[in-house]
Amino acid sequence: MGSVSLKIGDGTARFKRATLCSSAVNILMLFSVIITNLFALYAFTYSPKQHITNPFHLPHKNISLISQHVSLIMKEIDSSQRKLAQMEKQLLGITEMVASVGHSCDKSVDLLSQYMSYKVSGPCPDDWSLAQKLILKGCEPLPRRRCFAKTVPKVGLTSLPVSLWKPVSEKILTWSGLGCKNFNCLNNKKSSKDCVSCFDLVNGYETQKYIKSRSKNDFLIDDVLAMGSGGIRIGFDIGGGSGTFAARMAEKNVTVITNTLNVDAPYGEFIAARGLFPLFLSLDHRFPFYDNVFDLVHATSGLDDGGKPQKLEFLMFDIDRILRAGGLFWLDNFPCADDEKKRTLTRLIERFGYKKLKWVIGDGGSGKPQVYLSAVLQKPVRI
């Protein structure tokens, strides 16, 4: 007899193998039912051992006696149920069974109802930002719809490798639901450290990223590729901005999938226009890849757990799952707000037993007390 224990809320699940304890619980439950029925039988057949000439003279005493026995039975049943529940929890770890996929959608019923309000076989509402809100709230994967998404003509696309660094036309991107409506606005906007003027493929730092370093925390692609055991062929980039890491890897004949969301900018469309592979997926979702398939996983500040160590822990286990033995985990300028966060992250990484091929901690050149960790780690072979 199998059993599953799920903990929902932080996107995690724990599974426990059933033991002979499950049979013990079943026996206890059967025993409880038998005892309860015996109590009931006793209550309604018991009569006092005193002689009563006419039982109708004292009807209230009989009723009172029966009520007392019923009360005792109810107390015994309640006590048995509490004990069984406690034993069940201790022996099997089962409290409730909840569906893991789509469970968080229940917390956003109003948004979900709005998302599913459309005309069948008609044009889909222009509501991609609503869909992204649902994803960010954990409602993922979204339900399928029977409507036609708005098409945007992709005029001026070029083939690889020219497309990697050719400026992308603003006309082929979707700007609805965004504060900025052009690249000039995006490039002047104070964005994350990973995307400072990252849509400028001509004059911005993107043209030098990963081939020239600005600080000791910036590793070069050639140096990292040289550390790869068995060669680097396919990789996964977490929080890859406008796709420059994947573009640099494409120049080295390495295929990279870039995880992204369109937070304040059309990242997905921009990456696709460069001839690269964007994956519209939040980090709360289990990566849709088989075990041990990637030679390299690259992660920037997009890996930040937002102050939730448990969330980062489960994310690290999923990264470990999709990375092959001997593969590289490249942690690129991960922000550590204080020493405590740095120690927490270090302890977490050390739990996996990765070999530290490169490990650098610096201030990132910002002048702020926050430090940044950059590392290249190699996954061990586990038996």
Image (tube, rainbow, N blue to C red):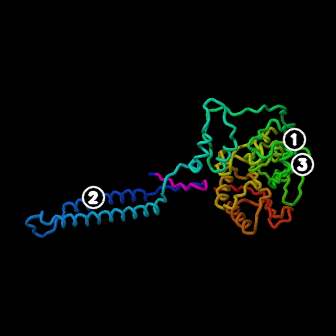
The Cα–Cα distance between marks 3 and 2, rounded to whole angstroms, is 80 Å
Q: Is residue 182 left or right of residue 380?
A: right
Name the amino acid type tagged 3.
Gly
Residue drawn where x is 81% and y is 43% of the image? 181
Q: Is residue 138 left or right of residue 207?
A: left
Residue drawn where x is 18% and y is 67% of the image? 61
The stretch of residues the image draws in magenta is 2-11
The x and y percentages for residue 9 are: 58, 55
The x and y percentages for residue 70 are: 27, 63
Residue 360 versus residue 57: which sits nearer the camera?
57
Name the amino acid type tagged 1.
Trp
What label does residue 204 carry, if any? 3
Q: Residues within 10 Å of mark 2 (few under 14, many from 20)?
A: few
What label does residue 37 carry, if any? 2
What label does residue 165 carry, if any? 1
Q: Is residue 107 magenta?
A: no
Name the amino acid type tagged 2.
Asn
Q: Please, what secondary structure does the residue beneath circle 1 have?
A: loop
